Amino acid sequence: MADSQHPRRVAHVGVTVPDIEAALEWYEDVLGWTRLKGPRTSTGGEGYGGRRGVDVLGEYESMNVAHLLTGGGVAVEFFEFEPAGEPQPVDPKRPGLFHLCVIDPDVAELASKIDRSGGDHYAEIWRLYEDSEEFRLTYCRDPFGNLIEIYSHSHEQMHAVAYAFEDDE
């Protein structure tokens, strides 16, 4: 087997929302993400895109899909299905993806902006390590119920110093 690039990078994550236009506007305004394309509509089973969509996602009548680019080059693909399923509360204990994490050096300000923009800053702002003031994090919900974690630093920076604070986790 030929060598492949390791570790593999994340290209995008997919998020289902009840109102794609409202979600795109919110993420562009609040997080500053850039629209790459869409939304475009696909009818389940019709045309190449509709046949591909049913094969990958299962049966659906119609869906809208759009792509936003984050500051780190990872995209977020937004989906809106017709008819929409019932919203389910996020349960971090249930296996599967449960949140997106964004980086902002001013965790409190971004959390406040999310709160003022229809989201919900529901958790305290925490230090990652009890004995360090530098690394901060918190959790919010977007207006559509999706969880957003905010880190003050990159993932590598947040966890590279773990050896110094091993007893705190």
Image (cartoon, grey):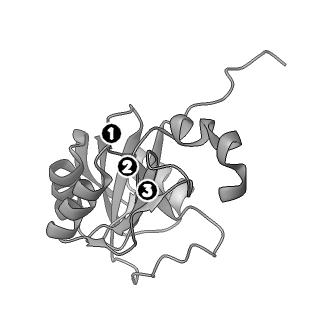
Q: Quadrant of the C terminus?
A: bottom right
Picture quadrant where residue 78 is located: bottom left
Image location of residue 90, percent across then percent down: 48, 76
Question: Hey, which residue is sitting farthest front in the picture?
Answer: 131
Can residue 44 be seen at all in this image of the molecule?
no
Image location of residue 33, percent across then percent down: 24, 42
Residue highlighted by disc 3 = 137
Separation of marks 3 and 2 at Cα, in angstroms: 24 Å
Image location of residue 109, percent across then percent down: 22, 55
Say which of marks 3 and 2 sits in front: 3
Residue drawn at (71%, 50%) of the image: 166
> Counting residues from the N terminus, which is met first, the one under dot 1 or under dot 3?
1
Q: Quadrant of the N terminus?
A: top right
Picture quadrant where residue 82 is located: bottom left
Q: Which mark is residue 70?
A: 1
Residue drawn at (38%, 33%) of the image: 72
Task: Give whichever of 19, 82 is nearer the camera.
Answer: 19
Q: Which mark is residue 100?
A: none
Report the amino acid beneath label 2.
Glu
Report the amino acid beneath label 1.
Thr
Q: How many marks?
A: 3
Residue highlighted by disc 2 = 77
> Counting residues from the N terminus, which is met first, the one under dot 3 or under dot 2?
2
Task: Give whichever of 115, 38 is nearer the camera.
Answer: 115
Residue drawn at (29%, 43%) of the image: 68
Can residue 83 be seen at all in this image of the molecule?
yes
Separation of marks 1 and 3 at Cα, in angstroms: 19 Å
Q: Indicate the secondary structure of the residue bearing disc 3.
A: strand
- In this rendering, the answer to whether 85 lies above or below 150 is below
